[in-house]
Image (cartoon, helix red, strand yellow):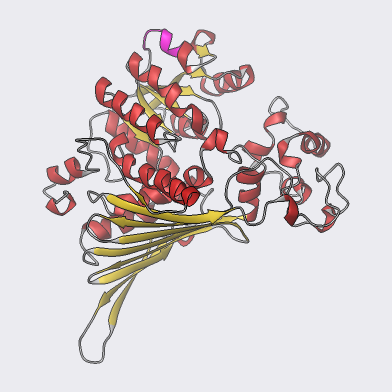
């Protein structure tokens, strides 16, 4: 097996998690460089992966000035940095495993797509849920024609109250200047899955409504302060107390909340409390500079007449993703966290109405577990990408940047439709011939996946 070498660009939680494949499978992957503006992050990655000083850089641009010394880059920078940091890597000849969403607007998206086509590099987007056993199995059933032709897709993501608060109210994705929208930051996975299930059929129209219902100053409890541990008399009774979310659960979202304490090997509770008094994660959830939504609904029409909906709601007691596909011959219904779905088929025989088959993949949990994060998707994503780079046959879950275009376009159009209060037509550049997955489908002799 050919061992591949990678450099980390943006040594944050996601990139380091993907890079950790080198620790569990050293015969497949070696991390040989890091680029990050934080000297501390550089040093942490260097210690963990044995990266020499001369292979530590302050930016992707500085890395790209050096002759190429690795096979690919793992780009885990923030959303608005994805395109600016990837372009010089492509020019230097690196293939890239790029965190989602790969762009924050349509102009950036086509700029990167054009660069990939021109340079001929391989770029895969981290749509990890494609690799989770639950969604991979659902997709396989659709490809086999288990429920006929899909006429309706209903997807929902309920973002738990603590995830909503830490990421989209207090955290790094609370402001559109960094992430474009909550829909793209959180649900580009779900939009990608919808596009993947309709692989080869383009979306044509998108409508959307939503807004910030609860995390606004006028919704704050009477007498609420501005910081939970500093000036808030109602903190002991507040559901969104930073003390309850983070001091009482110090391991929950630790890779975000305790970033200011990364220089400490073993921070104490007092260290954490002092950090919350100063950091964004200790702010009142009703009094931040958040300008993204806390709920949004999206409606999509595809070229073959199929319709799809995605309902995103933030602040729920339990985080979950659900999926319900209705086809001309049956339906598939399931919940991601249970890694279990039901296939029902029409059964018109006397005394019958439908048949039912339960598919239980026996993978539990979303963010953690023996099978890796995101229901097993994290580890499988990296393994599939390595097979892709080695020239082996990748799994149907593996994505090129072309495969990610439709899902991103749906998201951009949905946000525009919500802002402007109208139905938006999905536009492609003149002469664009983007048929996600069609090449793979044709090679497999599966003409059902080709655009009519």
Where is residue 257, by image quadrant? top right
Residue 436 rendering spot, x and y as whole percentages = 25, 43
Residue at figure coordinates x 47%, y 53% from the top left: 421
Residue 238 seen in the current view: yes
Residue 446 in the image: above or below residue 269: below
Residue 207 in the image: above or below residue 47: below
Viewer-nearest residue: 399 or 249:
399
Chain part drawn in magenta: 63-68
Residue 339 rendering spot, x and y as whole percentages = 43, 59
447 vs 377, left or right, is left
Residue 70 in the image: above or below residue 165: above
Judge whether residue 187 is colored magenta. Answer: no
Number of on-image labels = 0
149 vs 321, left or right, is left
432 vs 21, left or right, is left
138 vs 277, left or right, is left
Residue at figure coordinates x 42%, y 46% from the top left: 411
Residue 177 rendering spot, x and y as whole percentages = 56, 33
Residue 329 rendering spot, x and y as whole percentages = 22, 72
Residue at figure coordinates x 44%, y 38% from the top left: 101
Residue 187 seen in the current view: no
In which quadrant will I find the N terminus?
top left
Viewer-nearest residue: 420 or 247:
420
Residue at figure coordinates x 28%, y 61% from the top left: 306
């Amino acid at each position: 097996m050919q061992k591949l070498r990678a450099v980390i660009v943006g040594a944050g939680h996601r990139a380091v998690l993907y890079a950790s494949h080198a620790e569990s499978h050293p015969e497949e992957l070696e991390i040989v460089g890091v680029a990050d503006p934080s000297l501390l992050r550089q040093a942490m990655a260097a210690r963990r992966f044995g990266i020499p000083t001369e292979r530590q850089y302050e930016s992707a641009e500085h890395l790209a000035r050096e002759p190429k010394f690795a096979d690919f880059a793992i780009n885990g920078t923030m959303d608005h940095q994805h395109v600016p940091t990837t372009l010089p890597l492509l020019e230097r000849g690196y293939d890239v495993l790029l965190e989602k969403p790969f762009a924050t607007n349509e102009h950036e998206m086509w700029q990167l797509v054009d660069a990939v086509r021109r340079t001929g590099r391989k770029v895969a987007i981290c749509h990890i849920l494609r690799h989770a056993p639950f969604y991979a199995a659902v997709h396989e059933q659709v490809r086999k024609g288990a429920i006929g032709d899909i006429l309706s897709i209903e997807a929902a993501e309920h973002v738990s109250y603590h995830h909503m608060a830490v990421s989209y109210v207090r955290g790094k994705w609370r402001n559109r200047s960094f992430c474009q929208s909550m829909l793209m930051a959180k649900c580009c996975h779900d939009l990608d899955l919808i596009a993947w299930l309709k692989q080869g059929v383009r979306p044509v129209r998108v409508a959307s409504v939503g807004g910030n219902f609860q995390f606004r100053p006028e919704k704050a409890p009477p007498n609420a302060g501005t910081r939970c541990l500093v000036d808030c008399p109602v903190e002991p009774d507040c559901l969104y107390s930073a003390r309850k979310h983070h001091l009482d659960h110090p391991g929950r979202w630790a890779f975000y909340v305790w970033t200011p304490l990364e220089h400490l090997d073993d921070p104490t509770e007092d260290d954490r409390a002092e950090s919350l008094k100063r950091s964004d994660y200790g702010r009142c959830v009703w009094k931040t500079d958040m300008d993204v939504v806390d709920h949004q609904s999206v409606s999509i029409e595809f070229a073959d007449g199929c319709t799809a909906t995605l309902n995103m709601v933030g602040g729920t007691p339990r985080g979950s993703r659900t999926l319900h596909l209705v086809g001309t011959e049956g339906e598939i219904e399931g919940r991601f966290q249970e890694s279990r779905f039901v296939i029902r088929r029409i059964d018109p025989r006397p005394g019958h109405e439908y048949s039912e088959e339960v598919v239980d993949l026996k993978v539990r949990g979303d963010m953690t577990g023996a099978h890796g994060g995101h229901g097993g998707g994290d580890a499988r994503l990296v393994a599939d990408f390595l097979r892709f780079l080695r020239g082996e046959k990748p799994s149907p879950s593996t994505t090129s940047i072309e495969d990610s275009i439709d899902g991103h376009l749906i998201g951009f159009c949905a946000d525009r439709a919500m802002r402007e209060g109208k139905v938006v037509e999905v536009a492609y550049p003149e002469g664009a011939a983007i048929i996600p997955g069609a090449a793979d489908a044709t090679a497999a002799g599966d003409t059902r996946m080709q655009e009519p």
